[in-house]
């Protein structure tokens, strides 16, 4: 006895539209069951995870704060994933962007360096992420090394580098031995959109990235190149698109946007370098990209949804004493449900019993 | 021939009212077919007529929606190929399933059940080789073998299990005429020993050579069961296609003009482990003529196509000259801008992206068409172009702008060839233009190729179909092991001469290029 997936001849657009809804419902049911197993009320958890954050103005702002890096990184990843190139190392590119941009903030600390510091920091963030993203791309195009492994392993290299810097050379000498750098000067701090708000200009960058990407992917030859490379690599070569150039370009773009997210987070929210600057944005962004079906607008919505799980996860920790691991587990369950729902829209499952013809 | 049918006992296998429905499509519609013991029965039909579906049902790969299979008179259910083999069916597929790195004996052993040791396989292999003239060296690695030898492995693999019915799907598509003749000898012998054979083909001459009964399918139904020897090839083709098959006409005589393509001393190492190196290729194609390149599959055709299209670059710029420009080191886009056009062998995945709409697929040759401007896609221009191609080349589509994979093979081929021809290229290079295409589409495509040449373009056609080349080509050469024979006017070639060149055993009159 075995299961067989056979492609459906026609794919109903209604089913395609309803698939994410079904995926969410299933993910909530599974998560609710897990919470019930842990001896808590699934209803109370749903209230804390979903309803409360959506009804509180402070939480709504926080939603934008958390969705910003997710959207920036996921938009970048959508370039890679469209071309069927698997950059799993956005977390590392995020950290490298923060390190390179943060370096300028520390260099100019205490000087009267002017308005140019911040734009340059952002630029360095992009460059840091892009260069770091190019490492797996070069290894793949030159030596045929699998980009999934290299990009993933480089995450740990980046994280440990930041750890070393924050505990070692870049540690604030007057910081009571806490493993963190000095606080950035105002010239190196990304300002909020409105006075007193936690939402900073990073959110604007994310929206711009969404709009630009929508145009690039939908209307330009470069966008078509990625789609063709992903869907039919031989046809892409036949169209004159070099696969090496494509690989380099998408890794540079996704690394650059992840690096931008890193420096935005450090200069806008955290205000200093410390060993940990991300609750796993770079990995969650993979879920965001797929949940948004690699569509820019979809990614924006998916980023808000996943941001909700971060915020809900924090309150659940406090209010229900549920571990933070549960939030990550839920994100994983959600990704699986989304991928499964998409597969079921295009394929039908058939139970094949051994030897039974009819 | 009726005598055969009415021999004692029931037929070996009898299909009654077999239907197979895929959604709205009825791939098989109430098919009746019976095969007598020892009979070589042909299954004829265009691509998409339902031959493969029927054979897959018989071999237990798919289950029918309705109908009954009787084996020696008693109803059976064939749930899987394993059950089919137990029953006594053997099948030789068009595409071989062999492990390149393993030896002949190992390849045979892996397909058999566990109680076959390598030693028994070896001894039975040499026995069968002798009996049926299927020469095979048990210890050769498969990747060193020709297509004909690989096919022998598949056949021997079936014969080891003493089949009662052997099914062969387009067995000669990869063979030289000589190798094909050899295969026919083997099949005759098997038939004489009582093994039935179901022979699937669209090559009429072979069917007439081998079979006394042929079942003709069209659009999923049996249109006739005939004695192929009692009918002319044209009559049989008419039954398959459903109307009279016209001939390719060329009003204007062949008047070659200026040189458009020159290949001079082109050498290229193989791309992969088992690729074919190109060896000192020389060829000239002039405006106004069709140059045919014949050859058995896997003799460097795809390598030559990649070198000509610029998907692989030559080591010297002057190895390939298009329209007077040395372009051996220019990529495919640059060559398209020199007014060259290319149609590769694989329609899905190479010439077109299966999941993309036809309008998007026009973007693949974007370098030479007006579907983009300064990096932006002109979507309405692409849609217009797709519509024009669909109309000019009679592409039958299920909807206005369908995904490429929704088209049948013939219609998609008309589209990808139309996409290139519509911009009137000075040079068109096409690899296997009518491979797996129905007769109607093949005729339209060949006509379009000839017309393009008569309007003053140079057309290079790489094909395994000799009849096709004799029909369209003005000049012809044969590729064997990555080397081209001298180019000669089509009138100076005979099928025998081509066959010898294909095998690499030809001796030119001057003795200049013996291999």
Image: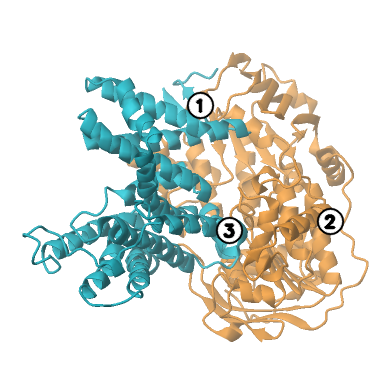
Chain colours: A cyan, B orange
- State the residue position of label 2: B392
Q: Residues within 10 Å of mark 2 (few under 14, many from 20)?
A: few
Which x, y percent locates residue A68?
A: 39, 51
Q: A163 or B273, which is in the foreground? A: A163
Q: Nearer the viewer, mark 3 or mark 2?
A: 3
Q: Chain of mark 2?
A: B
Q: A176 or A280, which is in the foreground? A: A176
Q: B315 or B473, which is in the foreground? A: B315
Q: Is residue B324 above or below residue B178?
A: below
Q: Chain of mark 1?
A: B
- State the residue position of label 3: A215
Q: Residues within 10 Å of mark 1 (few under 14, many from 20)?
A: many
Residue B151: image tag: none
- State the residue position of label 1: B80
Asked if both marks, 3 and 2, belong to the same chain, the answer given is: no
Find out whether the residues at labels 3 and 2 contact each other: C-beta distance under 8 Å: no
Q: Residues within 10 Å of mark 3 (few under 14, many from 20)?
A: some
Q: Does label 1 or label 2 sit earlier along the sequence? A: 1
């Amino acid at each position: 006895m075995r299961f067989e997936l056979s492609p459906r001849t026609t794919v109903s657009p209604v089913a395609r539209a309803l698939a994410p809804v079904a995926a969410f419902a299933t993910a909530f049911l599974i998560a609710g069951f897990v919470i019930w197993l842990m001896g808590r009320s699934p209803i109370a958890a749903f209230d804390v995870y979903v309803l409360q954050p959506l009804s509180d103005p402070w939480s709504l702002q926080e939603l934008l704060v958390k969705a910003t890096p997710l959207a920036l990184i996921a938009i970048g990843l959508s370039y890679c994933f469209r071309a069927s190139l698997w950059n799993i190392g956005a977390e590392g590119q995020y950290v490298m962007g923060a390190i390179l941009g943060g370096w300028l903030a520390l260099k100019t600390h205490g000087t009267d360096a002017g308005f140019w510091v911040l734009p340059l920091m952002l630029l360095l963030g992009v460059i840091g992420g892009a260069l770091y993203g190019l490492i797996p791309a070069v290894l793949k195009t030159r030596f045929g090394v699998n980009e999934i492994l290299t990009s993933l392993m480089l995450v740990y290299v980046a994280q440990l580098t930041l750890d070393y810097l924050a505990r070692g050379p870049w540690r604030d000498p007057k910081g009571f031995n806490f493993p963190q750098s000095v606080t950035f000067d105002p010239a190196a701090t990304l300002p909020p959109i409105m006075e007193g708000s936690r939402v900073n200009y990073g959110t604007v960058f994310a929206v711009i990235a969404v709009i630009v990407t929508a145009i690039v992917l939908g209307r330009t030859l470069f966008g078509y190149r990625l789609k063709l490379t992903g869907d039919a690599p031989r046809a892409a070569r036949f169209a004159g698109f070099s696969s090496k150039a494509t690989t380099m370009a998408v890794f540079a773009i996704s690394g650059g946007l992840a690096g931008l997210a890193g420096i935005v987070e450090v200069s806008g929210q955290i205000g200093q370098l410390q060993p940990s600057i991300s609750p796993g944005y770079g990995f969650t962004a993979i879920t965001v990209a797929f949940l948004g079906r690699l569509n820019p607008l979809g990614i924006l919505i998916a980023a808000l949804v996943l941001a909700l799980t971060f915020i809900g996860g924090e309150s659940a920790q406090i209010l229900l004493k549920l571990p933070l691991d549960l939030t990550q587990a839920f994100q994983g369950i959600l990704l699986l449900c989304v991928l499964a729902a998409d597969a079921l829209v295009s394929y039908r499952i058939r139970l094949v019993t051994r030897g039974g013809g009819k | 021939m009726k005598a055969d049918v009415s021999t004692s006992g029931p037929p070996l296998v009898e299909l009654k009212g077999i239907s197979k429905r895929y959604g709205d499509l009825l791939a098989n519609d109430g098919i009746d077919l019976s095969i007598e013991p020892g009979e070589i029965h042909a299954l004829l039909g265009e691509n998409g007529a339902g031959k493969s579906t029927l054979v897959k049902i018989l071999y237990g790969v798919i289950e029918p929606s309705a109908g009954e299979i009787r084996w020696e008179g008693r109803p059976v259910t064939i749930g899987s190929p394993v059950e089919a083999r137990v029953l006594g069916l053997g099948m030789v597929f068009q595409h071989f399933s062999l492990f390149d790195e393993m030896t002949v004996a190992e390849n045979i052993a892996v397909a058999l059940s566990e109680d076959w040791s390598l030693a028994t396989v070896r001894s039975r292999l040499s026995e069968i080789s002798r009996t049926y003239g299927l020469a095979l060296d048990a210890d050769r690695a498969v990747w060193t073998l020709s297509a004909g030898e690989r096919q022998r492995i598949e056949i021997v693999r079936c014969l080891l299990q003493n089949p009662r019915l052997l099914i062969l799907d387009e067995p000669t598509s990869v063979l030289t005429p000589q190798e094909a003749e050899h295969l026919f000898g083997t099949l005759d012998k098997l038939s004489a020993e009582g093994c039935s054979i179901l022979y699937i083909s669209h090559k009429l001459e072979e069917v007439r050579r081998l079979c006394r009964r042929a079942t003709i399918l069209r659009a999923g139904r049996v249109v006739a069961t005939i004695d192929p020897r009692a009918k002319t090839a044209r009559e049989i083709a008419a039954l398959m296609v459903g109307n009279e098959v016209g001939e390719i006409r060329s009003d204007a005589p062949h008047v070659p003009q200026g040189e458009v393509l020159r290949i001079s001393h082109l050498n290229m190492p193989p791309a992969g482990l088992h690729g074919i190196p190109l060896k000192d290729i020389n060829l000239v194609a002039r405006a106004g003529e069709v140059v045919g390149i014949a050859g058995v599959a896997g003799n460097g055709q795809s390598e030559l196509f990649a070198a000509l299209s610029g998907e692989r670059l030559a080591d010297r710029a002057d190895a390939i000259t298009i329209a007077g420009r040395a372009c051996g080191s220019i990529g495919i886009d640059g060559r398209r801008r020199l007014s060259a056009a290319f149609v590769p062998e694989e329609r899905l995945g190479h010439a077109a992206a299966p999941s993309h709409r036809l309008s998007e697929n026009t973007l693949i040759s974007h370098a030479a068409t007006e579907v983009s401007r300064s990096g932006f896609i002109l979507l309405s221009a692409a849609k217009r172009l797709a519509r024009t191609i669909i109309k000019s080349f009679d592409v039958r589509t299920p909807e206005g702008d369908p995904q490429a994979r929704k088209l049948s093979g013939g219609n998609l081929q008309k589209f990808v060839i139309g996409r290139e021809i519509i911009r009137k290229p000075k040079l068109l290079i096409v690899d296997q233009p009518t491979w797996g295409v129905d007769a109607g589409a093949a005729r339209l495509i060949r006509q379009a190729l000839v017309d393009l040449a008569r309007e003053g373009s140079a057309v290079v056609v790489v094909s395994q179909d000799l009849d096709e080349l004799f029909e369209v080509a003005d000049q012809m050469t044969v590729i064997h092991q990555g080397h081209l024979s001298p180019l000669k006017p089509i009138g100076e070639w005979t099928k025998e001469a081509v066959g010898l060149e294909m095998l690499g055993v030809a001796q030119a009159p001057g003795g200049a290029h013996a291999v």
